[in-house]
Image (cartoon, coloured by chain):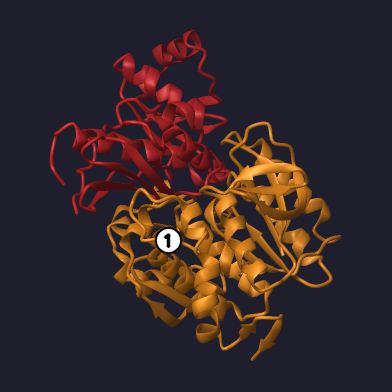
Chain colours: A orange, B red
Amino acid sequence: MLIAGTIPIEDLPLIMGTVRAEGEFLVIDGHSIPCTQGTGAMIGAALAATNYLKLKAPQVLIAGDIGQGKGSREIYEYLIQKVTDIPPEVLALHYCLPDMALTRRLCEAVEKCTKRPIMIADAASMYAAKAAGLASKFDIFTPDATEMAFLADPDATHPAYINRHLFDTNIAQTPRLVTTAYKNRSAAKLLLVKGATDYIIRDGEIVATIDEPNIPELEAIGGTGDTITGLISALTYAGLEPHEAAIIATRANRMAGKFAQAMPATRVRQIIDQFPAVFKEYLCQWSGVCYMEGGDYHG
Amino acid sequence: MLKRKQESSFEGSGLILFLDVRDALRAEKVLKDAKYAARLVAPPAELRKGCDLAVKIKLVEQLGIKRLLNQKDVAYVSIDPLKAGTSELLQIVKVTDFGGWIMVRAGNMKLTFNENSGVIVNTSGGGCPDIPYLHAELIGKRLNEAARPRDIGFTLCALMLDRALEECLILWQGGRQP
């Protein structure tokens, strides 16, 4: 699994390596990064899942970028040049300055891989994929309700430009927006739409909705969407079907919010810290794949 | 939940194009400070890269506008007649009251503050690379002391976060209650 995205440290160089946790930080090739909103939270959640399942820790490709785009372009260019040499089983793209031309080149490069990676996009990587008309090249998108409206708006190239009547819709309107997005070929094969009710949609059909436990405060906590994307990436890498991974990811995120007694001022690190306890208590029940002490799996 | 009315518009006939969002944000501020009609919009689709911003102006005022932007060292690519296909930025916001904390959503960005102290406790949403940076910069600061995302950010997500912060300031300073 390869997670690619920017980190808000301006002078951080382009780094590729295996991630490990060290206290409150994530360490890649000797560089410490915070486990905060954005790519850090996504990596932190994915690592929590791979550690629990005793899988190989995620490979990550990161670069410093505070919005000027240099680190984002370095990540895209590296992937364009190297993805066929790697090639990852799962490629999850996250916070990068949206660039339609680079996204197009990356998709062309991915098509040349001997085994095509499972392609996951969230945040601005999803914006660029949709804006460039490449959404259907992706296996999984993880939009929130506003971003779902963006996917449904045929003219918007960024959520800042979505049509007002689409912004006014609430999460209950998701099925209508989904139909429009698929009709416009602006959706990935699987959508996990995050909101008061989470919708899991496969090829335009709703396969599950999840609304328990109801923790409205999670919406205010920066990074709780990133953790869902990290979990779905890791669970897909673990071999679950994308829709199964999506269902478990959203349930685990909600339950971690409950375990953490989340409030609007809670930090995402506190949510991530709960994942091992959530997996221990619920993963077997939710997935039917049970990890026993000592390292054996039982299906 | 409360929604804000859309800002009054004007009949713009010209468009200033920029290489990046930050220049557009600076230009809009410079022009508004000088009392020019100016509004941030998306450039026409054929000119978009993915995170783009242009400024709509009255074309008849372009001479003075060019001079002002040059005086203030604001870089721009060109000033052209307005074409079909530009889009207005989303102006409306939504407010959620968590009981002690208020969350304001502008587009894809959300900002939450303590309603008594005015301290920003979280930002969420968005996807551009300056958003995690702004998250770290804003949390723990009082609304009226925090740096404005439009001044230290670079992208459309930062602009939406700035709109959320602006609305939070209005709410906290008593302009209205959610």
Quadrant assignment, res B160: top left
Residue occupying the point 41% across, 38% down: B139
Q: Most extreme residue toward the bottom, as rendered? A: A299
- Give the tally of numbered discs: 1
Estimate how packed mark 1 is, as few (under 14), some (14 to 19) or many (20 or more) residues with alpha carbons within 10 Å. many
Residue shown at the point (68%, 42%) measured from the top left: A32
Asked if residue B34 is positioned above or below residue A82 in the image, the reply reads: above
- Identify the residue shown where x is 62% and y is 73%: A235
Side (left or right) of A62 relative to B145: right
The residue that label 1 is drawn on is A144
- Pinpoint residue B105: horizontal percent, then vertical percent: 32, 48
The quarter of the displayed image where residue A258 is located = bottom left
Out of B40 and B101, give the one closest to the viewer: B101
Q: Which residue lies furthest to the top in this view?
A: B71
The image quarter in which residue A260 lies: bottom left
Q: Where is residue A50 in the image (x, y as percent from the top left)?
A: 66, 68
Note whether residue B117 is visible: yes
Q: In this view, does A110 lie to the left or right of B107?
A: right
Instruction: Locate the N terminus of chain B by quadrant.
Output: bottom left
Q: Is residue A105 left or right of residue B64?
A: right
Q: In this view, does A151 lie above or below A76?
A: below
SS class of the residue under badge 1? loop
Q: In this view, does A227 lie above or below B149?
A: below
Instruction: In the displayed orientation, state which residue is furthest to the front.
Output: A294
Query: For the point 56% across and 36% down, which residue is it?
Result: A67
Which subunit holds the residue at mark 1? Answer: A
